[in-house]
């Protein structure tokens, strides 16, 4: 016990001055294997800050989408535009604009990121784990991973045993509808050791709580969700494996964007009784991975094709805090609705060679190709309700908008490391990227190209086999892009980040930790301003406004003081600020905070295993998360006295208890137990913000075979 107390005291001192994200949640000591560097490694050996959440922990915590995951990972935040639509932010970098994302999302080897506004919704279904890689991943993952990457690692077919599971869940939303979910998994080794399939599917009905009283809509944000994933694995030889994956995702919701008022109602612009087009978020994904073991390394070819359709409404009402009316003579309250349709097709191909095992010389080298075609159409209705009685109100109806975009990009990348001694490793990597873009706005076609070279260097020192110290310098890149009409194009963004960290397992598995402090230099940050046209439409103007500095610390530890009890805590502190402004039409000034960055966020968790009887084991889990308010600043639209404007502080408490009776299991659960009703998003001055989900209480029954 004295030895354990020494370890805990030492960790407390380290955690007070440095940073951490979680490591393993199940200690004693079960090694966590990740593929963050595109080859299998122990988590403790990877010189990158990573939060790894196992599939079992995802289920026990009740994390059912990326919004839930964001509350479980301190320092992560997102902008949500209804079910399926997310923009993910991390490590003090938050930016809604640009041609690509800041955080890349992957399902196994398949990239789910299409553009900065379009990332496919992936539900935590039959997963091995989720890996959240923090900091720029430009060398191995390319543009779109400036702030980090999220990887959903699915379970592959087991070629030896038949099996599966089925679960049924019923839950009740405070002030809303019930939610029914059925999930099934089937593993079938058609030819033992040679060929098998694995099918995972989920269906969801209900779960809404938002009303539009003027239109007679009750619980209008119910989700009708169908998500089916089929994986087939063929191993014709011991060295060769071929795996195919098909994902079919369908989701429809009547009140589609999720924007709501504190009373849980939705206000529709122009006509409060108008029924907007339902939101539909659909996609088909096809992936083929071919792996060949060469003995000295593994050769991989990964091909992915995505067909995505997103049909959704958009409604906005300018609040009194906005200065948008100043663009119109006499001033006006401006509001409008859109009927938006996004259609996208993307093909990507990656080929890479990775070293086998963990030897003196380790490497990953490869190439990547992507081709994306996007068609965006919109029909606007806009109302200008003039404050000056001398001006009649203006109403613009059925204004069409068309935008077609094409992206074709290439990349070559490599990462190598050398073990100079048994404990000291030095490594580095680089990625060359070229992006050719073309756009058509309905009248003219424009073309441009962007390229980048993104290096990374790192070093690690193994104090013991289970304690690692590391330092790294890495860069990230996002392409430039087009503004509409005669507006000038915007240039790429660049990021350089410096990180020091440590991760390890102490006391023979009693304690696991991961720590990191970092500084990031974010140049040519993109921001958007709005321009009002004479016909009532608006154009967005994206500009490179200047420079941001980010200083941060993360911390987390898991401690098993008793065999049956595990305690965990994670925390993140971020100081992200605009330090230089060079654009004459900038929406920020020096000293502004960066949007959507919580200064402090943390989680606390406890897991206890018990025996209800000698043959009926059970568990009890409780989790608490806290996130500081996040801000938004746009000086082209809002009066200075209201800036920055904020979301609320968010505190969420959840709990789950379950027992296993042979092959069956029963669980009772509750999320948002205190029934918090808070702004998650700060953009409520335009009635474009969502709030925390109401309290949900439910029961889940499952059977494994």
Image (cartoon, rainbow, N blue to C red):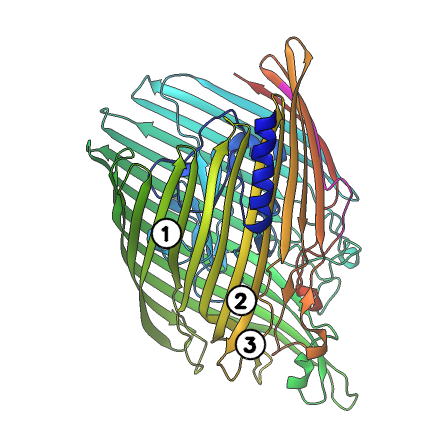
Marks 2 and 1, how far apart at CA: 32 Å
Q: What's drawn in magenta, residue-wise?
A: 665-677
> Is 277 colored magenta in this rendering?
no
Residue density around tag 3, few if under 14, some if 14–19, many if 20 or more, within 10 Å: some
Q: Which mark is residue 600?
A: none
Q: Position of residue 445 (x, y in %)?
A: 36, 75
Residue density around tag 1, few if under 14, some if 14–19, many if 20 or more, within 10 Å: many
Q: Quadrant of residue 703?
A: top right
**Is disc 1 placed on a helix, strand or loop?**
helix
Q: Residue at x 39, y 53 (%)?
A: 472
Residue tagged 3: 529
**Is disc 2 placed on a helix, strand or loop?**
strand
Q: Position of residue 631 (x, y in %)?
A: 64, 64
Residue tagged 2: 378
Q: Residue at x 45, y 75 (%)?
A: 483
Residue tagged 1: 141
521 lies left or right of 564: left
Q: Is any part of residue 323 visible from this angle?
A: yes
The tag earlier along the polypeptide, 1 or 3, is 1
């Amino acid at each position: 016990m004295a030895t354990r107390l020494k370890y805990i005291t030492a960790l407390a001192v380290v955690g007070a001055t440095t940073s951490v994200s979680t490591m393993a949640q199940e200690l004693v000591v079960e090694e966590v294997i990740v593929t963050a560097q595109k080859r299998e490694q122990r988590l403790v050996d990877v010189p990158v800050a990573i939060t790894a959440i196992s599939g079992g922990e995802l289920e026990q915590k009740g994390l059912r989408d990326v919004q839930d995951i964001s509350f479980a990972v301190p320092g992560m935040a997102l902008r949500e535009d209804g079910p399926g639509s997310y923009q993910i932010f991390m490590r003090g970098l938050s930016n809604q604009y640009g041609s690509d994302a800041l955080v890349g999302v992957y399902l196994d080897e398949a990239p789910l990121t299409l553009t900065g506004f379009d990332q496919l919704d992936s539900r935590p279904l039959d997963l091995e784990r989720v890996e959240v890689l923090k900091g720029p991943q430009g060398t191995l993952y390319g543009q779109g991973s400036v702030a980090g990457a999220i990887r959903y690692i699915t379970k592959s077919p087991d070629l030896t045993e038949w099996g599966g599971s089925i679960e049924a869940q019923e839950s009740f939303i405070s002030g809303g509808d019930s939610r029914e979910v059925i999930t099934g998994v089937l593993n079938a080794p058609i030819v033992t050791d040679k060929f098998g399939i694995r099918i995972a599917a989920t269906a969801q009905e209900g779960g809404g709580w938002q009303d539009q009283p003027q239109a007679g809509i009750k619980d209008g944000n119910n989700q009708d969700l169908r998500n089916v994933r089929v994986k087939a694995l063929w191993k014709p030889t011991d060295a060769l494996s071929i795996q195919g994956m098909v994902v079919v995702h369908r989701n429809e919701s009547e009140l589609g964007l999720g924007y709501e008022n504190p009373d849980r109602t939705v206000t529709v612009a122009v006509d409060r009784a108008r029924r907007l087009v339902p939101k539909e978020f659909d996609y088909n994904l096809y992936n083929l991975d071919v792996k060949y073991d060469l003995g000295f390394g593994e050769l991989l070819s990964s091909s992915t094709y995505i067909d995505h359709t997103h049909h959704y409404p958009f409604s906005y009402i300018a609040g009194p805090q906005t200065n948008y009316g100043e663009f119109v003579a006499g001033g006006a309250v401006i509001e409008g609705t859109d009927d938006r349709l996004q259609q996208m097709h993307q093909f990507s191909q990656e080929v890479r060679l990775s070293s086998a095992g963990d030897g003196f010389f380790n490497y990953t080298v490869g190439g990547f190709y992507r081709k994306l075609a996007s068609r965006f159409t919109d029909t606007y209705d806009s109302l200008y309700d003039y404050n000056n009685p001398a001006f009649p109100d203006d109403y613009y109806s059925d204004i069409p908008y068309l935008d077609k975009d094409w992206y074709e990009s290439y990349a070559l990348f490599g990462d190598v490391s050398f073990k100079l001694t048994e404990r000291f490793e030095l490594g580095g990597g680089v990625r060359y990227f070229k992006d050719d873009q073309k756009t058509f706005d309905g009248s003219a076609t424009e073309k441009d190209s962007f390229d980048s070279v993104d290096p990374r260097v790192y070093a690690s020192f193994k104090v013991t086999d289970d304690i690692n110290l590391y330092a790294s310098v890495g860069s990230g890149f996002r392409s430039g892009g087009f503004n509409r009409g005669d507006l000038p194009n915007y240039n790429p963004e660049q990021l350089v980040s410096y990180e020091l960290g440590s991760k390890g397992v102490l006391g023979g598995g009693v304690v696991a930790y991961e720590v990191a402090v970092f500084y990031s230099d974010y140049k040519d940050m993109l921001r958007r301003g709005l321009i009002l046209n004479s016909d009532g439409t608006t154009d967005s103007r994206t500009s490179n406004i200047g420079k941001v500095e980010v200083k941060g610390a993360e911390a987390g530890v898991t401690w098993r003081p008793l065999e049956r009890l595990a305690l965990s805590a994670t925390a993140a502190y971020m100081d992200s600020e605009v330090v230089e402004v060079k654009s004459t039409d900038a929406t920020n000034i020096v000293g502004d905070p960066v949007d959507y960055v919580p200064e402090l966020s943390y989680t606390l968790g406890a897991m206890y295993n018990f025996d209800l009887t000698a043959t009926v084991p059970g568990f009890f889990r409780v989790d608490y998360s806290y996130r500081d308010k996040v801000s938004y600043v746009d000086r082209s639209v809002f009066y200075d006295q209201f800036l920055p404007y904020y979301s609320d502080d968010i505190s969420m408490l959840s709990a789950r208890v379950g027992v296993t009776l042979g092959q069956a299991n029963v669980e009772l659960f509750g999320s948002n137990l205190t029934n918090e009703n808070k702004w998650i998003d700060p953009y409520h001055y335009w009635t474009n913000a969502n709030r925390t989900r109401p309290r949900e209480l439910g029961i889940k029954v499952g059977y494994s075979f």
